[in-house]
Amino acid sequence: MAGKLIVDTIDTDNAFITLNVQQSQIATMNVSGIFSNTGVKMIGANGTVSNTAITGLVTASQIANVANTQITGLVTASQIANVANTQLTGLIQAAQIGSANATLVTSGTLPKARLPTGSVLQVVQATTTSDASINSNSYANTGFSVSITPTATSSRILLSCNFGWSCNTAEFGIFTFGVNGTPDGAAEITCFNQSATNAGNSLYYASISYIYLPASISTQTYSLQFKCTNAPAQTLFFNERSVSGASGLCTLTATEIAV
């Protein structure tokens, strides 16, 4: 016979209160909360709901307004169907997110620090049609440079330069990169004019590239520097034919790469 029990308070001397239906246990309660018949805590004494007590998908229509302080344990993507951010209050901490696939991110900006190794973070390029000359065997700046500010101390900078040159004798000319004004001998390239009779009549083109690890987020200035091998008799020209003075277009490119 069905009946109804209405009470204000239920007290027990035992550690648990057990709820049975037709001799089948459906739940137990103690001072720490309510447990299922398999011993899984469903609701804590403080009102929090454990994610282990959630089965199936939770849709947006089933959630009115849940504060992040009421969720204990990790909630995984498979337990959430579609919840609008307008239905969440408070900040969601990293410890409260089990696993999120990058394909689920449909808005916002991904921080550069989260990009994989080898990603291009930024590219800065300088161009010039100016020229310069030197007749010294010590490095000097051609006046051509580019500046870049790394976004991380672990980044590498790939530096590449395409430039024109000529020489008034059949001699070697040497080009290198300058790092914040200091010549870098490790990145040297030697250009050779093989014909003394044609010296200065042609504008030759060369390229040089090198990878740097600044280990800094301060602005780095890279320049193209040059010197002669037989000064002072020899004159080396950057982006210039000594006979006519004609010049071309030179490029200097700094590419920041994530590591």
Image: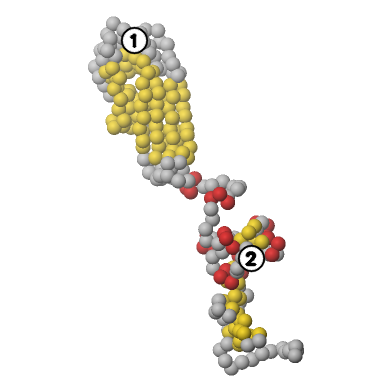
Q: Amino acid at mark 1?
A: Gly
Of the two numbered discs 1 and 2 in the rendering, the one whose residue sits closer to the viewer? 2
Q: Neighbour class for label 1 at 10 Å: few (<14), some, many (≥20)?
A: many
**Residue 156 percent coordinates (x, y):** 39, 40
Q: Is residue 160 above or below residue 258?
A: above
Q: Is residue 61 above or below residue 204?
A: below
* Colour pattern: secondary structure
Image disc number at residue 214: none
Q: Nearer the viewer, residue 30 or 88?
A: 30
Q: CA distance from mark 1 to mark 2?
A: 77 Å
Q: Residue furthest left?
A: 230
Q: Amino acid at mark 2?
A: Ala
Residue placed at 28% from the left, 9% from the top? Answer: 195
The residue that label 1 is drawn on is 200
Q: Is residue 159 above or below residue 87?
A: above
Q: Quadrant of residue 155?
A: top left
SS for tag 2?
A: strand
Q: Quadrant of the C terminus?
A: top left
**Residue 19 percent coordinates (x, y):** 63, 85
Q: Neighbour class for label 2 at 10 Å: few (<14), some, many (≥20)?
A: few
The residue that label 2 is drawn on is 67
**Residue 98 percent coordinates (x, y):** 52, 61
Q: Nearer the viewer, residue 98 or 85?
A: 98
Q: Nearer the viewer, residue 149 or 124?
A: 124
